[in-house]
Image: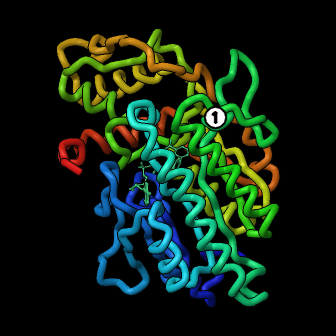
């Protein structure tokens, strides 16, 4: 099955969290196939913006439903009436700092929300015929943060034991376990992805890369936790989406796929790279890296993440197409040109 070549099929696809950074861009990609009907289920939190989606709400093949996955009844009704062929589950509270300040909403959305969606999916799965059962999939989008923290060496892979450390990562780990249990116990055809840190246009400006760009443009202190030497493996959003689509089409039921961008770098070096890009694009009397300001570390801050993506590369022929230099250039240019969007979304009261 190829979602973009199989023109005869008019699949109905549910995307949860489709008003968020990754979900919205995934919807834009899916909408390139005019035969697909997309149903976006999102509660609309502080990080959401439906303007990220390139389609008029009048078009029949796209529908937005304002639904909180914590609300069991609404989720069951929605899944039953949509009657989907695929479910791609991205809805989650996603910011580690917020999870430290207010863990409850992470438990509600990421754990109970996933549970409600799984139960609604199980009822739906039990009703569909065997022909549709052959291709139906529940794709659960998770993070590499469920694996905890690496030392200087080694990589996370599908074989790594779970060891989450923050309320965010433990809520995502819990949701992964529920998804696996619904596969083993009830036979639901699930696939899980564990991806590294995403970046790109449209990301809410509380995350490190857009935050750095926004602070630099405003000539304000660019905050960096601790000694700035924590390492992340950055992936450009289009590469993540490309991987998700390959998995949706050909991923093996019951499997997990680790997705990383070959973009391992420490935070200080990353922020310096961004500052150099802005030095070129918007020269200032002093280098932007002079605004970098080391601040008190985040409690329980994981030291290093790095992904071994060899399984998805071998099984599905996926490769990241962007490297950190070209991905960061595109991203920085986008934020410089969309400064007003960042100001607006950051100052909204929700
Ligand atoms: N951004 C990353 O670097 C990254 C990396 C790996 C995995 N992920 C995972 O990808 C998914 C999407 O991440 P993102 O960066 O787009 O996040 P985001 O915060 O930009 O968007 C999340 C969306 O989910 C919605 N949502 C949250 N709780 C909900 C609920 N209870 N009911 C309905 N909708 C709800 C929000 O309203 C928001 O629109 C998450 O599951 C996240 O854990 C993100």
Say above or below: 227 vs 263.
above
Residue 178 appears left or right of 303: right
Question: Pointer 1: what residue?
Answer: 262
Whether residue 35 is visible to the viewer of this picture, yes or no, is: no
Residue 212 appears left or right of 154: left
Coordinates of residue 33 in the picture (x, y in percent): 52, 77
Coordinates of residue 241 in the picture (x, y in percent): 56, 56
Circle 1 SS class:
loop
Residue 129 appears left or right of 72: right
Whether residue 138 is visible to the viewer of this picture, yes or no, is: yes
Say above or below: 325 vs 23.
above
Name the quadrant containing residue 9: bottom right
Residue at 40 percent of width and 68 percent of height:
67
Name the quadrant containing residue 189: bottom right
Residue at 67 percent of width and 74 percent of height:
122
Which of 117 and 288 lies nearest the eye of the viewer?
A: 117
């Amino acid at each position: 099955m190829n979602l973009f070549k199989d023109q005869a099929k008019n699949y109905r696809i549910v995307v949860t969290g489709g008003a968020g950074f990754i979900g919205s861009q995934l919807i834009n990609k899916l909408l390139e196939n005019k035969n697909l009907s997309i149903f976006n289920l999102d509660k609309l939190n502080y990080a959401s913006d439906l303007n990220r989606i390139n389609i008029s709400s009048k078009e029949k093949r796209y529908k937005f439903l304002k639904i909180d996955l914590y609300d069991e009844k609404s989720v069951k009704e929605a899944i039953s009436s949509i009657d989907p062929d695929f479910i791609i589950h991205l809805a989650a509270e996603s910011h580690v700092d917020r999870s430290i300040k207010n863990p409850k909403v992470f438990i509600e959305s990421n754990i109970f929300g996933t549970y409600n969606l799984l139960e609604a999916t199980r009822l739906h799965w039990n009703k569909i015929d065997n022909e549709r059962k052959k291709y139906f999939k529940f794709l659960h989008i998770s993070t590499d943060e469920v694996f905890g923290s690496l030392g200087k060496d080694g990589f996370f892979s599908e074989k790594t034991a779970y060891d989450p450390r923050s309320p965010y990562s433990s809520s995502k780990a819990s949701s992964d376990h529920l998804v696996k249990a619904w596969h083993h116990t009830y036979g639901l055809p699930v696939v899980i992805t564990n991806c590294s840190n995403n970046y790109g246009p449209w990301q809410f400006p509380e995350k490190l890369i857009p935050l750095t760009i926004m602070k630099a443009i405003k000539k304000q202190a660019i905050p960096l936790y601790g000694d700035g030497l924590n390492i992340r493996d950055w992936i450009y959003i289009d590469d993540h989406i490309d991987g998700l689509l390959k998995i949706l089409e050909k991923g093996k039921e019951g499997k997990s796929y680790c997705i990383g961008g070959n973009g391992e770098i420490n935070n200080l070096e990353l922020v310096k790279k961004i500052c150099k890009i802005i030095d070129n694009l918007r020269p200032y009397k002093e280098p932007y890296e002079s605004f970098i300001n080391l601040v008190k570390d985040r409690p329980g801050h994981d030291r290093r993440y790095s992904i071994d993506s060899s399984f998805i590369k071998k099984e599905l022929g996926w490769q990241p197409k962007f490297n950190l230099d070209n991905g960061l250039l595109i991203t920085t240019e986008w934020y410089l040109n969309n400064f007003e969007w960042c100001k607006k979304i950051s100052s909204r009261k929700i």
